[in-house]
Image (cartoon, rainbow, N blue to C red):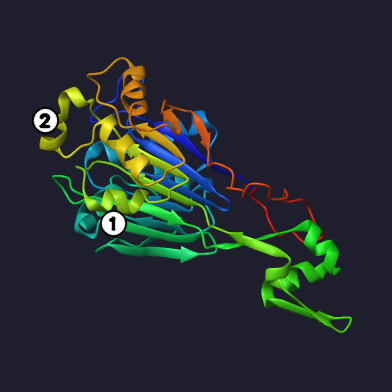
Amino acid sequence: MARELVVLGTGSQVPSRTRSQNGYFLRWDDEGLLFDPGEGTQRQMLFAGLPAGAITRICVTHFHGDHCLGLPGVVQRLSLDRVPHTVHAHYPASGQEYFARLRHASSFYEVAEIAEEPAYDDGPVAAGDFGVLTARRLEHPVEAFGYQLVEPDGVRMLPAALREYGVAGPDVGRIQREGRLEFGGRVVTLDQVSTPRPGQRFAFVMDTRLCDNVFQLAEGADLLVIESTFLSSEQGHATAYGHLTARQAARVARECGVRKLVLTHFSQRYDDPEAFRREAAAEFDGELVIAADLTRTPVPTRRQKSGEEPVVAVDVVVEQFE
């Protein structure tokens, strides 16, 4: 099982020779979330080795073309490949007409099941074993939402404590489910053989001015994917057109305690990606990625407390994603 971001496209407004339009695929255990499939996404997925069947959710932030014109090809490919599972689609409810047009942009034999679950306001749009997917409204000339994926908090089992208390085999799973075990005349609680494990967080912020919800989405993110269309020298353009600069995006990451920052959605006016790195690095000293098409970046491994014993395999899988 893996958690990683596959970058399909990183350009804004129009593609260039080196950057396709937007497209981002988040592999999150059994979930595959495709964010903002711009023009050419289906072909980029082929180059990245991603089958249509890997998609379980499609998340559109807004209906400007560079964030959604790849939808027709992706939707039709789902049916062509006869993807057997339901694919859930999240997008601003105000763009229902646009989604309908894109979904049925041309004639095809539709067999794949797409469940439309639009966002009407700030709040959760989906929940399951993978966590909670929340949408929050951003500030852009058209209605736009950012997305945050939060895994439930859990526990990390401590091998030494398990051995000390004689908990092994199926009993490891039982104590996780029930919180306590009674055997040999004594009671062992989950607290005695585990330590709290915060759930991981992912945030996706596209076209927006700086606003409160940008910070809400990014708060505590292990991995933040955020637009940085402009450099600070074009701050006026960024504000006027509802975008962020690299410096602003990095400030968000710093103030929100982000562990890994991925900058993307670059204006075609710039031909030096390192300029974005230099500007962001002046604000943010964490792990920084300047996204490029067809690159992969893993979600950071889980935080471990200083001196904490590494997790090792036990008879029951209790921790899959260290």
Q: Considering depth in this image, is 233 or 160 the residue closer to the camera?
A: 160
How many marks on residues? 2
Precedes in sequence: disc 1 or disc 2:
1
Q: Nearer the viewer, mark 1 or mark 2?
A: 2
Q: Considering depth in this image, is 54 or 200 the residue closer to the camera?
A: 200
Please state the horizontal and vertical placement of residue 206, each as a whole percent of the image: 29, 42
Please state the horizontal and vertical placement of residue 196, each as a whole percent of the image: 60, 62
Q: Judge left or right: residue 33 versus residue 49.
A: left
Give amino acid for label 1.
Answer: Arg
Q: Look at mark 1 in the image and give the residue it sits on.
A: 136
Residue at (72, 69) in percent of width and height: 192
Q: Judge left or right: residue 165 versus residue 157.
A: right
Whether residues under marks 1 and 2 lie with C-beta atoms below 8 angstroms apart, the answer is no
**Vertical position of residue 182 compared to residue 51: above or below:** below
Residue 37 appears in view: no
Please state the horizontal and vertical placement of residue 80, each as a whole percent of the image: 47, 45
- Disc sitting over residue 236 in the figure: 2
Q: Considering depth in this image, is 239 or 69 the residue closer to the camera?
A: 239
Q: Judge left or right: residue 96 versus residue 273.
A: left
Give amino acid for label 2.
Answer: Gly
- As helix, strand or loop, the secondary structure at mark 1 comes to strand
Residue at (23, 36) in percent of width and height: 244
Given the current orientation, which residue lies at the most extreme right position?
184
Q: Quadrant of residue 274?
A: top left
**Vertical position of residue 276 compared to residue 81: above or below:** above
Q: Considering depth in this image, is 186 or 143 the residue closer to the camera?
A: 186
- As helix, strand or loop, the secondary structure at mark 2 comes to helix
**Category of crowding for the residue at label 1, using alpha-carbon neighbours closer than 10 angstroms: few (below 14), some (14–19), many (at least 20):** many
